[in-house]
Image: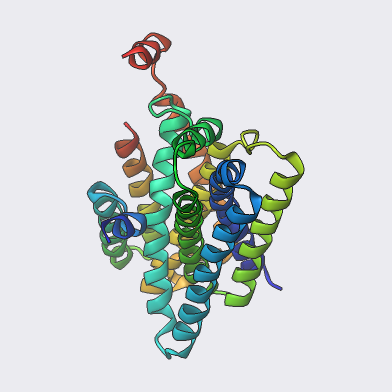
Amino acid sequence: MKKLFQLIFGDFRNLVSVGLGILLAYAAGHWVHAAAGWTLVAVLLAAGFWQAA
Amino acid sequence: MNATQWGGMSAVFLASAVEWVEAFTIVLAVALTIGWRRASGAALAALAVVSVLIAVTGAGLAAVQADINLIRAAIGVFLLLFGLRWYVKAIRRYAGRTALHDEAREFSETRGRLVHAEARAAWLVAFKGVLLEGLEVWLLVVALGHTFSYTQASVSALAALLTVAAAGLMLRVPLTRVPENTLKFFVACALLSFGSFWSLGGLLGERTVWPLGDATLLLLFVVYAVGGRVMSLRLRLPATVVSREGSA
């Protein structure tokens, strides 16, 4: 079960990264619609760097 | 077929191929120990289990008359979780912070473990290996197939399986020549692109968030690919550190 969970969601940092990206993008989308998508991309790239470092 | 269907089928094909390469390596190692007939039987049994799962889940989801945007958002988030993991792993391997996945080493280690094992245990190794990799393919088929077509997603996964098996059987050696990390990196970029597109498109409206429509997918792919390569260069360890860590 733990293996399946990890297979789907990854570790805690992975969950936090994606969750934070969606939240920030959702918030940005309420200010400027077109900014939502690229906010998510920026957060995910930063998260990728953070996790890989 | 439209661009979304072609893109979805390509993503399923490439992602499935990565998993099937790993599964085939295990089956190959087992086959040389207990014979092709029994190893193939184990692989087919595992594939049968995965096929049933695909059929049941596909039918179950198709019967649910749920909000397509909500489902798209949920699938998008799942793809982001799945894709980000692969993305980080590939960057670390490019940067030399994690050893490159070595199919030849996996092959020799698997064979070594089987030398004194019972035939039944060997059969289980092949069964579990194919089942685990098949499970990952199933998750991809369910996630991506809902958006365009379960049939097309299943056909793509099956085509990837047949391609890998045919290539492996023709070569008759472990598939060490397949640049696994490069393949995984580009698959991760594709998963992140689809995940970004669908998650926010489902939550806030596709045309609102991505005014360029489907063409955005290509742009997202390029951004993630270039970003990942730049990161791997920035994170590359000096040769002295790599050799010290390797000898530790």
> Foreground: B176 or B4?
B176
> Foreground: B224 or B41?
B41
- Quarter of the picture holding the N terminus of chain B: bottom right
- Quarter of the picture holding the C terminus of chain B: top left
Q: Is residue B96 above or below residue B2?
A: above
Q: At 51% across and 63% down in the image, what residue appears?
A: B46
Residue with the most extreme right position: B170
> Foreground: B58 or A31?
B58
Q: Is residue B74 above or below residue B244?
A: below
Picture quadrant where residue B98 is located: top left
Judge from the rendering whether residue B97 lies leftward or rightward of residue B191; answer left or right. left
Q: Position of residue A3 (x, y in %)?
A: 31, 55
> Foreground: A6 or A43?
A6
How many numbered badges does the structure rendering display?
A: 0
Q: At 51% across and 36% down in the image, what residue appears?
A: B111
The colour style of the image is rainbow
Judge from the rendering whether residue B197 lies leftward or rightward of residue A45; answer left or right. right
Judge from the rendering whether residue B105 lies leftward or rightward of residue B151; answer left or right. left
Q: Position of residue B240 (x, y in %)?
A: 38, 8
Q: Position of residue B76 (x, y in %)?
A: 42, 65
Residue with the most extreme top position: B240
Q: Is residue B211 above or below residue B108?
A: below
Residue B153 at least partly seen: yes
Q: At 62% across and 47% down in the image, what residue appears?
A: B35
Q: At 43% across and 52% down in the image, what residue appears?
A: B83
Residue B149 at least partly seen: no
Q: Position of residue B28 (x, y in %)?
A: 60, 44
